[in-house]
Image (tube, grey):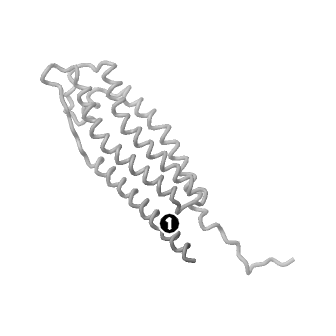
Amino acid sequence: MVDRLDTPLQPDPLQRIRRNSRLMAWACVLIIMALPVALAAYWSTVTSTELAVQGSLPSLAIQQQLLPWQRWSAGATMAVPLALMLVGVWQARLCFAHFAQGLVFTAQVARYLRNAAAFMAIAGVAAVVCGAAASVILTWTNAPGTRQLSIAFSSNHIFTLFFAALIWMMADVIAKGRALVEENESFV
């Protein structure tokens, strides 16, 4: 019996992309499940001083014990940007699921990436608006004249918007590349 060494087995060139994409799709699911639980645990247990600092307020801005409705309303308000971001993560998961099937340069992948980028950008803007609303909620029971509205725009917001623009640009490149391939195929 003779082994044929002259025809080496050709591995799937997308094998690594498929494997890593399956892992990333599962990571997206884990993030979608874990972050809402972590947010609820955080808002349930964190001290009002820490909430003030996280909300871009002075550490002593919350002058009285937070009422349960304040804690839960502010937490729900801050859940809005997280929810938007998680919808974007779901779109990324759909993109990774396509990659895992070997579907890389498709119109659907470009659409998923654009959706992920759009939800990330909206979440970045919502974080600023919701943070301002949460600061009002957290200081609502303060004495008149000591309630606060804090509007914060940080490097985290800039990075989120930049990253969303980066993903949107990648989606445009994929869509344009796909359009060029289709155009070239029509000439053949």
Q: Residue at x 52, y 43 (%)?
A: 29
Q: Residue at x 47, y 54 (%)?
A: 111
Q: Residue at x 18, y 29 (%)?
A: 148
Q: In the visual, does 8 lie left or right of 184?
A: right
Relative image position of residue 130 (x, y in whole percent)? 29, 35
Judged from the image, the secondary structure of the residue bearing numbered disc 1 is: helix
Q: Quadrant of residue 5?
A: bottom right
Relative image position of residue 21 (x, y in whole percent)? 55, 55
Please state which amino acid type lies under the numbered disc 1: Arg
Q: Is residue 52 above or below residue 173?
A: above
Identify the residue at the far right of this view: 1
The N terminus sits in image quarter: bottom right
Relative image position of residue 176 (x, y in whole percent)? 44, 66
| Camera-nearest residue between 114 and 83 | 114
Characterize the local packing of mark 1: few (<14), some (14-19) or many (20 or more) Cα atoms within 10 angstroms.
some
Identify the residue at the far left of this view: 145
Relative image position of residue 155 (x, y in whole percent)? 27, 49
